Image (tube, rainbow, N blue to C red):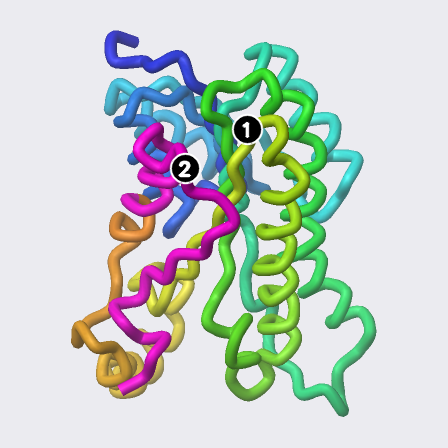
Amino acid sequence: MSNSNGKVAVITGATGGIGFAVAKRLGKDGFTVLLNGLNSEEGASKIAELTADGITAEFYAFDVTNENEVNDNIKKIGEKYGKIDVVVNNAGGLGGRSRFEDMTTEFYRSVMALNLDSTFFVSRAAIPFLKKGENASIINYTSNAAWNAGGPGAGIYGTSKAGVHAITRALAKDLAEYNIRVNAVSPGTIDTPFHAQIKATKPEVFASWKDNIMLGRLGQPEEVANVVAFLASDNASFITAETIQVGGGQALGI
């Protein structure tokens, strides 16, 4: 592809929402983008969309909470391309809501796995290949919930994201000697399919969310992708161990 910069980016949970916006943006910046997800059919249609845009892209179906699947697939990618330049640990989510008194151990483990284990497994598997990358970096996703412990029933989500905040700094310390940078973005309320249900069933609640945001509106997936693209670029070559809030001032409350 004519505008390829020879760099390789792995994006987990990349078949929709913010993840796909990131894949598209990094692809436009010349990266070969390797999308991960669980649904191969969805993966194929997203790859077709990116390819039609002139972007070099491939899909790898694996579960980011399963260390063997992660190890096998990241190794496959690393060996095929000889390196990995950027890892975007985009996969994650609320995983449901539960108050602590009623919380099953299974639910606790599933939310921790989805957000924290996945970041650990993918980062660990990628490190040998990031060492061969150029201005290599890892970009994680945390949340306001990491600081305020989340809303009702989202306490374990907040706990898992606090773990992501800490592991971002810990990885940055660990990998600085290899010149591998590690940063995180903390998206505010972004208008994605993640919120489709509440948008459809309680439009007035959805509409009220913007009242807590200084800039008076919800974010767009592309606005998060722009910050991820900056962190992945040479423009961010002296930035590591940072978390950037992408929330229109929502973190401060109004």
Q: Which secondary structure, mark 1?
A: loop
Query: Residue visible at 71% across and 42% down?
Result: 121
Comparing 54 with 148, the one in front is 148
Is 88 above or below relative to 93? above
Q: How many residues crowd around disc 2 within 10 Å: few (fewer than 14), some, or many (20 or more)?
A: few
Query: Residue visible at 33% across and 27% down?
Result: 27
Residue type pointed to by label 2: Phe
Question: Which quadrant: the C terminus?
Answer: bottom left
Query: Residue visible at 25% across and 8% down?
Result: 2
Q: Position of residue 125 (x, y in %)?
A: 70, 31
Q: Which residue is mark 1?
A: 179
Is 120 above or below relative to 220? above
Would residue 130 appear left or right of 216 to someone viewing this image? Answer: right
Can residue 166 be seen here? yes
Query: Residue visible at 35% across and 31% down?
Result: 233
Is 85 above or below relative to 95? above
Is 227 above or below relative to 218? above
Q: How many residues crowd around disc 1 within 10 Å: few (fewer than 14), some, or many (20 or more)?
A: some
Comparing 246 with 118, the one in front is 246
Mark positioned earlier in the residue sequence (2 or 1): 1
Residue type pointed to by label 1: Asn
Q: Quadrant of residue 226?
A: top left
Q: Position of residue 4 (x, y in %)?
A: 32, 13
Can residue 34 be seen here? no
State the count of labels. Answer: 2
Q: Is residue 241 magenta?
A: yes
Residue stretch rendered in magenta on the structure:
226-254
Q: Position of residue 73 (x, y in %)?
A: 67, 27
Q: Which secondary structure, mark 2?
A: loop
How far is disc 2 from disc 1 in space, using C-alphas? 10 Å
